Amino acid sequence: MMKERYRTLLLLMLIVTTAACTTDRAIEEIQNSIDEIGSHWVPDRREGVSNVSVSLFGGVYTLKGELCKPAHRDSLLAWFGGQGLSVADSTTMLPDTTAGSWALVSVAVANMRAQPRHAAELITQASMGTPLRIMKRDGSWLWVQTPDMYLGWITSSSVEIAGDEGIAAWRSAERVIVLQNSAFIYAGENEQAIVTDVPLGGIVTGDGISAKHFRVVLPDGRRGFMRLVDGQLFSRWSASAVPTVASLEMYGRRLMGVSYLWGGTSAYALDCSGFMKTIFFVNGVILARDASLQQRHGTAIESSATDWSQLLPGDILFFGSQKTRRAGHVGLYLGDGEVIHESGMVRIDNLGSDRPNYSNYLFTTYIEARRVIGLPSQPGLMHVKEHQWYVNISE
């Protein structure tokens, strides 16, 4: 009798365990489908939000997590319907409008981190006047998206919150862009007191012009004077700025010797892709943030570390793993094997082993080249004058 009860108990345990395993496998397969759909809508989570998980209770699958595209949510629900599965949607759509819609960087350079704490990894920076889309808030931290679509956490003390009307007014206002490595904003035209500094590519609102100065207003309302030689009216600059070999090289050489900083994107300190972003931005084009993201854009050019014949000055060169072909470093080609890049400092090295500035690192890690000069505005190569975060463009 005891043996029969024991056998029955074992059988029940086996049935329950088998059912649980079957359910776990089914949920795992469904999660894989959810992730696949997410990869379609958000190819890279550095540039978008796709964080959805699934659970099962009472025969109903529940979706939880965060999304940034309504069409993504619609695709998920349609997939469950196509499978004949009951689904409850508990996902959150970002941006979270209760956190505010827009912000403008109000300090010279704002650090953006991987997590909402100061000890977290520095992943990028945003210079004064950069428009940011606010995704959500966590205490005194804001999760924001930059104009290149990059996501990161920034302290609320580094920005000025702007609603839809405020950001629209900023886009329509005359502004001034800094075109020197750094410019000072002075309290008066006598230049005796400094209000703040603004790095290359920083933007402030214009409030008139005197003999030697732009009168400017900072995003947080502070006022001051900036030398005319340090910048240009944004409207004039954005209408005419295009990347040329001469201009890219000029701005690149101006940054020679600037120290390396992981996550740095200002003229004060840079990483390799931040250097490329900076010199392209002041030439009117917003590149993707990281080297591996920049690698996805532009026209691929046949080349190798030993054959530069097809390369032209101004091409973007990528370096990294020969096995994965994923870029971890990037630089600008100047011609004749010369590459200007940020490596310890902004410097010029050469791919030729017979040159005094030969770089074995660049030679052994060369992956590919991309040409972007002359291409029309597109994601990853967006022209500032056509970017809706900078200018009001009618649909």
Image (cartoon, rainbow, N blue to C red):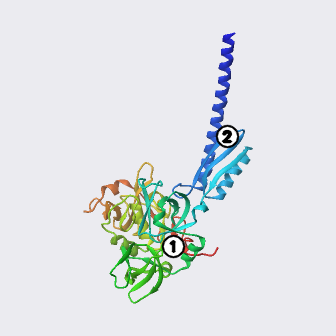
Q: Secondary structure at mark 1?
A: helix
Depth check, mark 2 against mark 1: the one in front is 2
- In this view, the residue in front, 384 or 332, is 384
Question: Which residue sits at x=68%, y=25%?
Answer: 15
Residue 32 image-quadrant placement: top right
Residue that extends furthest to the left in the rendered view of this protein? 356
Indicate the amino acid at tag 2: Leu
Instruction: Report the side of 359 relative to 317 (left or right).
Output: left
Question: Residue 323 placed where, x, y %?
Answer: 43, 48
State the residue position of label 1.
384
Question: Residue 115 placed where, x, y %?
Answer: 47, 53
Question: Which residue sits at x=40%, y=82%?
Answer: 225
Q: Is residue 138 above or below residue 192?
A: above
Instruction: Report the side of 77 relative to 244 (left or right).
Output: right
Residue 371 in view of the camera: no
Question: Reading the chain from its start, which is encountered first: label 2 or label 1?
Answer: 2
Q: Is residue 46 above or below residue 175?
A: above
Give me the disc on residue 56. Answer: 2
Q: Is the N terminus in the top left, top right, bottom left or bottom right quadrant?
A: top right
- In this view, the residue in front, 162 or 384, is 162
Question: Residue 181 placed where, x, y %?
Answer: 36, 73
Q: Secondary structure at mark 2?
A: strand
Question: Residue 118 placed where, x, y %?
Answer: 42, 56
Crowd tier of the residue under label 2, counting other residues whose Cα lies within 10 Å: few below 14, some 14–19, many 20 or above: some
